[in-house]
Amino acid sequence: MNPVAATPAPGPLYQFRNAGLSLGGKLILDDIAIDIRKGEIVCIVGASGCGKTTLLRLAGGLFRPSTGSVLFEGTPMTAPRQDVAIVFQDYGRALLPWRTATGNVSLALEAAKVPARDRGPRIAACLAKVGLGGHADKYPTQMSGGMQQRLQIARCLAQDPQALLMDEPFGALDAMTRQSLQDEVLALHAETAATIVFVTHDLEEAIYLGDRVVGLLPHPGRVGIDIDIRLPRPRNQLATREDPEFLRLRRVLFDFIEKSEGHRA
């Protein structure tokens, strides 16, 4: 069982105002109009190719919208921000193999120009939060996939982010490791109250983690469903997944994905 998260603060952290994006002359996202509140966990689902990762990159300032706007605390998101961290699915490429766990987390502090004398305690705290306190001197190649993904999360936590953007971070992991990391994300959210935007193909994962689930229709990507998840917290891997409301939500999202296949070009 994981801790109860703080109640999301009122007011949006992100505002997508009819945002659209074209790449190479192709419309990828169109008319995205959603707000994401401070402290909220919003999971993004949809069929392959619907633009989930592209939406996350808009939220991270890696792309600028071609139409409309993306606002962060009321300010247009035009470039990456220090207080917005991204956890990528491919942890093997995200980590530096020639740096230890300590060195990889230090990278975020170096980018923020934190003095070397102040880095040690912060690095140790971040590693401890993700259960890697005893592995500070290990290199990524000496770690399992789950440990490497924990290390990437620790590096993001070193940024002290307001928003944590997670792009299918557990997709390559086995089921037991994935569930363990899901609970760790909820525990970190309860501790930090960061806003989390979480992209996943796994509908049950989206329901288990989220305060809301937003589903995208494909070609171009656009919002097709936006539902509140009112399951009680703290969530529990067995009890929550057996809740009749969980099963109802799974059916709603499954039907949405199935029908969205008809929107393919």
Image (cartoon, rainbow, N blue to C red):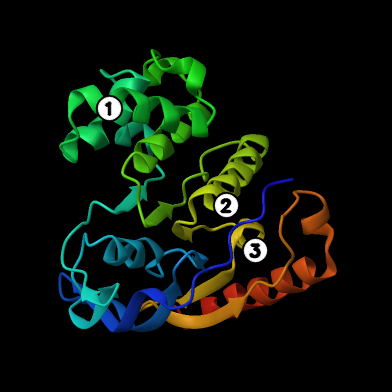
Q: Is residue 211 left or right of residue 155?
A: right
The amino acid beneath tag 3 is: Ile
The answer to whether the residues at label 1 and label 2 have Cβ atoms under 8 Å apart is: no
| Picture coordinates of residue 149, whole percent (x, y) | 45, 35
Q: CA distance from mark 3 to mark 1?
A: 36 Å
The relative height of residue 163 versus residue 15 in the rendered view (above or below) is: above
The amino acid beneath tag 2 is: Ala
The relative height of residue 198 versus residue 89 in the rendered view (above or below) is: below
| Picture coordinates of residue 249, whole percent (x, y) | 71, 72
Q: Which residue is mark 1?
A: 119
The amino acid beneath tag 1 is: Arg
Q: Secondary structure at mark 1?
A: helix
Mark 2 or mark 1, which is nearer the start of the sequence? 1
10 Å crowding of disc 3: few (<14), some (14-19), many (20+) = many
Q: Which residue is mark 2?
A: 190
Mark 1 or mark 3, which is nearer the start of the sequence? 1
Q: Which residue is mark 3?
A: 207
Total number of numbered discs in the rendering: 3
The relative height of residue 66 versus residue 112 in the rendered view (above or below) is: below
Q: CA distance from mark 3 to mark 2?
A: 17 Å
Give the residue drawn at x 16%, y 76%: 25
| Picture coordinates of residue 236, whole percent (x, y) | 75, 50
Mark 2 or mark 3, which is nearer the start of the sequence? 2
Give the residue drawn at x 43%, y 30%: 125
